[in-house]
Amino acid sequence: MKKYNFFAGPAILPQSVIEQASKAALSFGDMGLSILEISHRSKEFVAVLEEARSLAKELLGFGDDYETLFLQGGASSQFFMTPMNLLDEGETACYVDTGNWSNKAIKEVKHFGNVEVLASSKDEGYTYIPKGFDIPSDAKYLHLTSNNTIFGTQYHSFPDTDIPIVCDMSSDIFSRPIPTEKFAMIYAGAQKNMGPAGTTLVIIRKDLLGKVKREIPTMLDYNTHIKKDSSFNTPPVFPIYVSLLTMKWVKEQGGVAAMELINEEKAAVLYDEIDSNPLFVGTSRKEDRSLMNVPFVMAKGYEALEAEFLDICANEGIMGLKGYRTVGGFRASIYNAMPIEGIEKLVGLMKSFAVRKA
Ligand SMILES: *Cc1c(COP(=O)(O)O)cnc(C)c1O
């Protein structure tokens, strides 16, 4: 039976990417060696890395004043590398708290400078994106989380401000066009929408760097990696290669603008069902709903049916639908690589469940 991967991360990859990656694991190009065993200094891998670095910027439309890095340590390491590299002692960085991941980012800032949390949606269980908050003019940067993987909310527009925005795009990178001019830096762990676990994309405007007074350990200094073309030490060869394959796939789909249309259509099919099916209700505010992670729960009075529906889904090849452990209910992660057939399958099961139970 065809299985559909609705897990939040590590997550679904395009089937064609998995096939190409499998071939490369046996024999890469005409090297006669596996991609898993080649030198990161080989001309073949240097070409992969250079193409991945330039295609990431090309897909999103970042110009020459930005550098692309493929780092290790996950998006979580960016939580501390960002203030370590950009924020001096005594300076203030502003954050918006939209859930677990922004909270973890906020927690790291105090090691390096001051943090001001401008707004939070904690009061309503992170079911919305705060809007209309004031941004202090002396803020060093404003940190946002573009898509909240756990709570299923997403910024559909970004604040208008001259303060440079740093954005965690781990779970919606390459899913839509972004206003690049607003961003000083974006970062994304690969394993949601870009590739397998093991590398983190960082795109950063070069003029921001080298301004803080503290001494930064070599490996944690963005400039170290920029000066060595993202190969200061051994980069994660295979995750970068698979990320390149996925980016090429996005380009073949028509780029991020075409991806956005596809993602809007896919998400609408699922949200329409959630809104019309008497057994289920969505948990995030309509205007802030994520196109990537769709959380929903059993409607009032039907809570006892949750485990039964999860079982039906698993038996029908819908994998990974269980909600985040602290949230409960369901979460359908429908990243770029999820085909609409997967969503239609899920919606079909929701419909037939309602026929029997509502
Ligand atoms: C998954 C996730 C992270 C954490 O990524 P790691 O690579 O595991 O450190 C950070 N931010 C967001 C928005 C995520 O979805």
Image (cartoon, grey):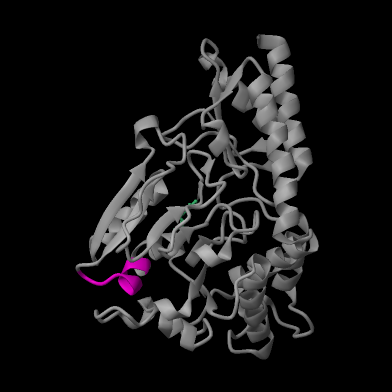
Give left or right: position of 91 versus 278.
left
Res 166 quadrant in image? bottom left
Answer yes or no: is residue 337 visible: no
Helix, strand or loop for the magenta stretch, by majority: helix
> Residue, x 24% and y 67% (percent of image)?
91
Residue 86 is one of the magenta-drawn residues:
yes
> Residue, x 59% and y 89% (percent of image)?
41
Answer yes or no: is residue 310 visible: yes
Quarter holding the N terminus is: top right
Quarter holding the C terminus is: top right
Res 264 quadrant in image? top right
In this view of the protein, which residue sits in the foreground, 11 or 35?
Answer: 11
Give left or right: position of 100 versus 289.
left
In this view of the protein, which residue sits in the foreground, 26 or 77?
Answer: 77
> Residue, x 61% and y 45% (percent of image)?
292
In this view of the protein, which residue sits in the foreground, 358 or 172?
Answer: 172
Give left or right: position of 351 versus 102.
right
In the rendered image, the residue lying farthest to the left is: 90
Give left or right: position of 312 versus 15.
left
Q: Where is residue 348 in the image (x, y as percent from the top left)?
A: 76, 26
Residue 281 is one of the magenta-drawn residues:
no
Reply above or below: 329 against 292.
above
Res 20 quadrant in image? bottom right
Magenta span of residues:
82-89
Q: Where is residue 182 in the image (x, y as percent from the top left)?
A: 51, 63
Reply above or below: 233 against 263.
below
